[in-house]
Amino acid sequence: MRIMAQMSMVMNLDKCIGCHTCSVTCKQAWTNREGTEYMWFNNVETRPGIGYPKRWEDQDHYKGGWVRKSNGKLVPRQGGRLMGLANIFANPNMPQLDDYYEPWTYEYDKLLSAPKDSKALPVARAKSQITGEYMDAPEWGPNWDDDLGGSMETMHLDPVTQKSGAVVKAEIEKAFMFYLPRICEHCLNPTCVSVCPSGAMYKRSEDGIVLVDEDKCRGWRMCVSGCPYKKVYFNHSTGKAEKCTLCYPRLEIGEPTVCSETCVGRLRYLGVLLYDADRVGEVAATENDEDLYEAQCEILLDPKDPDVIENALLNGVPRNYIEAAQASPIYKLIHDYKVALPLHPEYRTLPMVWYVPPLSPIVDEVTAHGADGEDAKILLTAISRMRIPLEYIATMFTGGNMAAAERSLRRLAAMRSYMRDIHLGKDPQEEIAAAVGMSGEQVQAMYRLLAIAKYNDRYVIPTTHPEIERSLDDFRCSLDGTGGVGMGGPRPQYSGRKVMVELMPRRPK
C-alpha cells in the first residue's frame, strides 16, 4: 500500500445560481493575458446543454480519456505511443477555435472619442481578439446557451441526453435545468500526463495537483485532445499548454482557490483525501462503467484508521496533511454521507472534483403540479418515477449507475423533509432518516455541512510549510500604516526572512 494525499473539491449544485462570479474572478487572476483570450479555467454551463467547448463530452469525436481493452489494460482513447507519434504534427482530435469560440472585443475608444456634435451615432464594432479583424456578429461564446437561451437549437446535441436516451422536451419552460461549474479535475489517473510526448505535464506528489512545466512544453497539444474534460488549453502566443492550477500558490499558504473564495453561493468545499496509489491502475481498469463510481470510492482511505495513518507517515505524508484529511468535508460528503458523485467516471481518469447532484429539478416539478415539494413521501416517490432527470444525472455523474444516483438524491430529499419539521418546531420524524439508511444525527450533521457550514468547515487546507506562519494578509500594502515601508519606517520581517523591499527611498532627515 502506497498512500498519497490528494487535494480535492466538492461542489453543491443546488446552491449554484449561475452568476459566473467564479469564472470571471478566475479569468482575471489567471487568463487575462495575450494568447489566453478564449481560455476559461473555470466555466459554468447550463444543463442540458452542449457546454464549452461544444460537445466536449462526445469522446467518440474528441477521443479523450482512457479505453479498456479486452485484455483488461488501459490505453488512451486517442491511441498509444505509435499513434501519438504518427499524429504529432497534425492532431486530428483537436478542438477547433469554433468549438470554443472566437473571442472578441469592441472599439470602445470610438465611443469615447466621438465628436460631441457628430451627426452619426457612434458605433463600437466587434473585433476579433485573434485576428484583429472586424466581426459581423459573434456566433458563439463560453456560455452561449446560458439559462437555456439557445437550447431550442442545441439541446438535442447534448451528448448526455443522447447517451441516456432521455427525451427532453423542447419547450424551455418544461425542461429541467441546473448549472454545472467546471474546472480541471486533477485526476488520479490523468490522460493528459500520459499522452504528453515531452513530459511537461506532471502530477505533484505532495497534493496531487496536475500542472504544466512550460520549460519542457513543446506545444504538441496531445494533452488538449487527451483530456476528456477539455480543461487543457493551448496558448497561441507563447506556444505552451496552460490549465487550471487549483490556485496552488494560495493553497500552499492555507487559502482557498479564487473560485471558492469568491463563490456567491458558498457551494464549494476543499479538503484532502488519502488514497492508495498502488490501486489506481486497477480501479481505473474496472470492467463495467457502472462499477467505476463504487470502485473509486473504495480507493479513498479512512484517514482515522490507525493503519492508514501509520502507512501514510511511512510514505512521507506530512502529519498536518493527515490531520486535514481527518477533518476534511470532502471525505464526509463522499464516504460518510454518500451524496457527492464524480463527473463522468467512465472516462477512467478518476476525477477528483466531485458534485452533489441537484435536487431542484425534481422539487420544482413536484411543486409545479401543486404538490408539497418538502413532503418526504412525495419527494422520495417522485425521484424514482421522474426518470428523465434521474437518468441524466446518472449518465453524467455515476457512469449510468442509477442506484447510486438515486441514493444521493433520496438522501438530499430526506434531509430537506427532516429539517423542515425541526425548523417548524415539530418533532423530527426518525423514519425519514431511516428510510435512506441514515440516523437523525447524521442527517443534521449533513445539513450543517451542506447548508450552514462556516468558512473553516468548508475549506480545510493544510499549509505546505506549516513552520512558516504566513497568510495573504502578510502581503499588504506597505503604506497601510504610519511608519511603514516608503514612509520612513523599517522593512518588515517575516519568519526570519526578508520578503518585502523598500518601495521608495527614505526621506532625508
Image: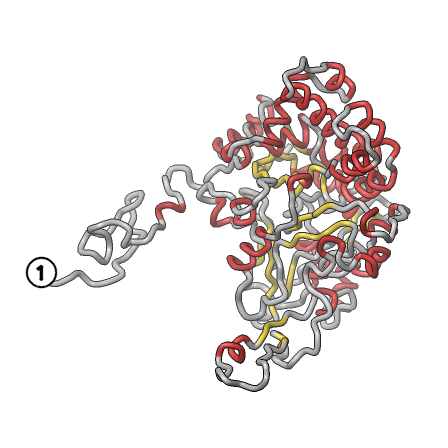
> Hey, which residue is sitting farthest bottom in the picture?
119
Query: In the image, is 58 to the left or to the right of 121?
Result: right
Question: Which residue is the site of mark 1?
Answer: 509
- Is residue 6 visible to us here? no
* Color encoding of the figure: secondary structure
Instruction: Please tell me how many numbered marks the rendered image carries.
Output: 1
Indicate the position of residue 452 as horizontal and vertical percent values: 57, 30
Q: Which residue is rendered at x = 76% and y = 30% of the image?
A: 373
Indicate the position of residue 173 as horizontal and vertical percent values: 81, 49
Q: Quadrant of the N terminus?
A: top right
Q: Which residue is rendered at x = 48% and y = 32% of the image?
A: 320
Front-lying residue, 256 or 200: 256
Give above or below for 454 relative to 136. Answer: above
**Residue 402 in which image quadrant:** top right
Give above or below for 149 relative to 334. Answer: below
Q: Which residue is rendered at x = 67% and y = 62% of the image?
A: 197
Q: In which quarter of the image is the C terminus?
A: bottom left
Q: Which residue is rendered at x = 51% and y = 29% of the image?
A: 323
**Residue 80 in which image quadrant:** bottom right
Callout 1: SS: loop
Front-lying residue, 53 or 116: 116
Q: What kind of residue is marked 1?
A: Lys
Front-lying residue, 477 or 175: 175
Front-lying residue, 174 or 464: 174
Query: In the image, is 493 to the left or to the right of 108?
Result: left
